[in-house]
Image (cartoon, rainbow, N blue to C red):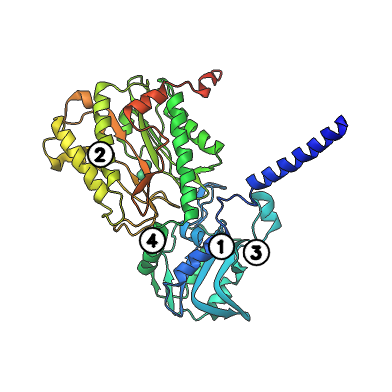
């Protein structure tokens, strides 16, 4: 009897576990863009195309690093947005109205690299012609048929983006991107570049719910990197080590790449806006460390900056400048509302910084503010870190950064006590119908929050490696 009861219990437990699991595990990751997403983007584009016109997109070039080693391949963001295809040597045609090709009605046509067992043994699987059609829900042809297609097609009104110039010719492949571009250029078609860039910008500026999900994830991952580094930071660590900690956290959350080279600058290095060398071997005890690092998750990139004191405590001067940048950022974020001019956050931040620097005697008048705050405070993020968009008045469902900074390099014409302070605070802001939401708020922002987080122990405190001679 007891055995029977145990058996019933086990069966019940198994069924419950299975049901719970099927509830928890969806068929596919809910945060992967599917073919319907990309199809809808092509429809959205098609609505803007006049009848009998076509838009032509080329995949991004493979970029060579040196000799026979290439950089990681990164698809052209527009191409990815419209297709989901992540391989090189491809062309997309979006028709203004359906076409009959080989007896079939098509609205879009994607030329892709065919399967090639030898190439795939070395460089990984290709979707291939049928595979790409099935996976992406689009009519496909081998890229080797692009030339005969062009010879037959009567392309009248053609929209295209500027053609990439940094393309290497693979002489063994007559359908590599180099050849596809040559074939296209040989037709001497007049193309409208401006109109297509405008349309793609309008589309990419306003994110769909799926894109917002991915951006949320990329931003949260980046914020977690900042949190872990705040706990782990110690004077004496190297800039490169700090960069590695951020990127390790990203990788642990499944983000393969950073959306731009990581910026980790200690002391005076923090005053170089895009300092990517991470060259300083030993971060000084009293230095600030500026960390502008953005995880790229499934193509979408965050852009988050925190500036923290290496020893866990801001000096009086560092705190004064930090709180001025924070006040400017708050003023900028308040401007992130539908209908406001794109320049509004920058202007608001500039006002606050100018006034503050005048009060501190660092500058004499507002016109000098650009010496210490020389960049804009806002750009869109998305598939690019400086994403496509109209840069006109704010629209709902766009995601922008607000990133004021004050940089006072050694030798600046002000009291020496300010020298070597470089501070940027950058958050990623979703513009909603009602106002804004700070997607990176998990990363501490205020002086008190940062100092509190830095006092926390880190799992990495015990991660000590032996010296190497
Ligand atoms: N990380 C580049 C920028 O902040 O725009
Ligand atoms: Mn930025
Ligand atoms: Mn940044």
Q: Which of marks 4 and 3 is nearer the N terminus?
A: 3
The CA distance from mark 2 to mark 4 is: 28 Å
Residue at image location 47% in from the left, 55% down from the top: 209
Describe the element under mark 4 as helix, strand or loop: helix
Q: Residue 212: x and y, percent?
A: 46, 51
Indicate which disc, 3 or 2, sits on the residue closer to the N terminus: 3
Q: Of tags 3 and 2, which is closer to the observer?
A: 2
For marks 3 and 1, give the CA distance.
Answer: 12 Å
Q: Residues within 10 Å of mark 1 (few under 14, many from 20)?
A: few
Residue at mark 4:
201
Q: Which mark is residue 134?
A: 3
Give whichever of discs 4 and 1 has the lower sequence position.
1
For disc 1, the marked residue is: 36
Can residue 179 be seen? no
CB of residue at label 1: within 8 Å of ligand 2? no
For marks 1 and 2, the one nearer the N-term is: 1
CA–CA distance between discs 4 and 3?
28 Å
Q: Do the residues labelled 1 and 2 touch (CB within 8 Å)?
A: no
The tag on residue 250 is: none
Residue at the image point whose x is 63% and y is 81% from the top:
103
Whether residue 133 is visible to the viewer of this picture, yes or no, is yes
Q: Is mark 2 within 8 Å of ligand 2?
A: no
Quarter where residue 280 is shown: top left
Residue 271 position by quadrant: top left
The residue pinned by badge 2 equals 328
Give the structural element (helix, strand or loop) at label 1.
Answer: helix
C-alpha gap between disc 3 and disc 2: 50 Å
Q: Quadrant of the N terminus?
A: top right
- Report the quarter where the C terminus lies: top right
The answer to which of marks 3 and 1 sits earlier in the sequence is 1
User: Compared to 135, does 458 lie above or below?
Assistant: above
């Amino acid at each position: 009897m007891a055995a029977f009861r145990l058996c019933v219990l086990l069966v019940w437990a198994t069924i419950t576990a299975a049901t719970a699991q099927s509830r928890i595990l969806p068929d596919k990751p809910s945060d992967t863009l599917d073919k319907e997403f990309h199809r809808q983007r092509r429809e959205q584009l098609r609505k803007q195309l006049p009848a009998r016109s076509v838009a032509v997109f080329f995949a991004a070039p493979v970029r060579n690093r040196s000799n026979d080693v290439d950089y990681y391949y990164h698809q052209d963001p527009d191409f990815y947005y419209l297709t989901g295809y992540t391989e090189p040597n491809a062309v997309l045609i979006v028709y203004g109205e359906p076409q009959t090709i080989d007896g079939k009605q098509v609205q879009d046509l994607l030329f892709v690299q065919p399967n090639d067992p030898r190439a795939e043994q070395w460089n990984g699987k290709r979707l291939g012609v049928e595979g790409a059609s099935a996976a992406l829900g689009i009519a496909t042809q081998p890229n080797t048929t692009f030339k005969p297609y062009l010879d037959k097609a009567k392309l009248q009104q053609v929209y295209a983006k500027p053609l990439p110039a940094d393309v290497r010719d693979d002489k063994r492949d007559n359908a590599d991107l180099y050849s596809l571009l040559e074939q296209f250029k040989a037709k001497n078609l007049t193309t409208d570049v401006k109109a297509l860039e405008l349309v793609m910008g309008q589309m990419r500026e306003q994110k769909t719910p799926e894109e917002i999900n991915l951006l949320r994830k990329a931003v949260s991952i980046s914020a977690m990197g900042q949190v872990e580094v705040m706990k782990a930071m110690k004077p004496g660590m190297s800039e490169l080590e700090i960069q590695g900690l951020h990127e390790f956290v990203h990788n642990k959350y499944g983000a393969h790449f950073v959306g731009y080279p990581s910026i980790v600058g200690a002391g005076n290095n923090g005053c170089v806006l895009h300092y990517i060398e991470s060259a300083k071997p030993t971060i000084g005890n009293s230095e600030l460390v500026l960390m502008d690092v953005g995880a790229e998750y499934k193509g979408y990139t965050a852009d988050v900056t925190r500036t923290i004191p290496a020893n866990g405590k801001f000096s009086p001067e560092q705190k004064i400048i930090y709180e001025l940048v924070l006040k400017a950022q708050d003023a900028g974020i308040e401007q992130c509302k539908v209908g406001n001019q794109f320049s509004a956050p920058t202007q608001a931040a500039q006002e606050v910084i100018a006034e503050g620097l005048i009060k501190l005697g660092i500058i004499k008048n507002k016109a000098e503010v650009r010496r210490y705050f020389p960049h804009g405070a806002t750009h869109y993020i998305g598939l690019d870190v400086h994403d496509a968009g109209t840069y006109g008045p704010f629209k709902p469902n766009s995601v922008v950064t607000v990133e004021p900074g004050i940089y006072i390099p050694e030798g600046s014409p002000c009291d020496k006590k300010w020298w070597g302070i470089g501070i940027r605070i950058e958050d990623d802001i979703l513009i909603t119908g009602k106002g804004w939401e700070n997607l990176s708020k998990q990363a501490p922002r205020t002086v008190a929050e940062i100092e509190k987080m830095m006092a926390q122990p880190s799992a990495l405190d015990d991660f000590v490696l032996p010296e190497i001679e």
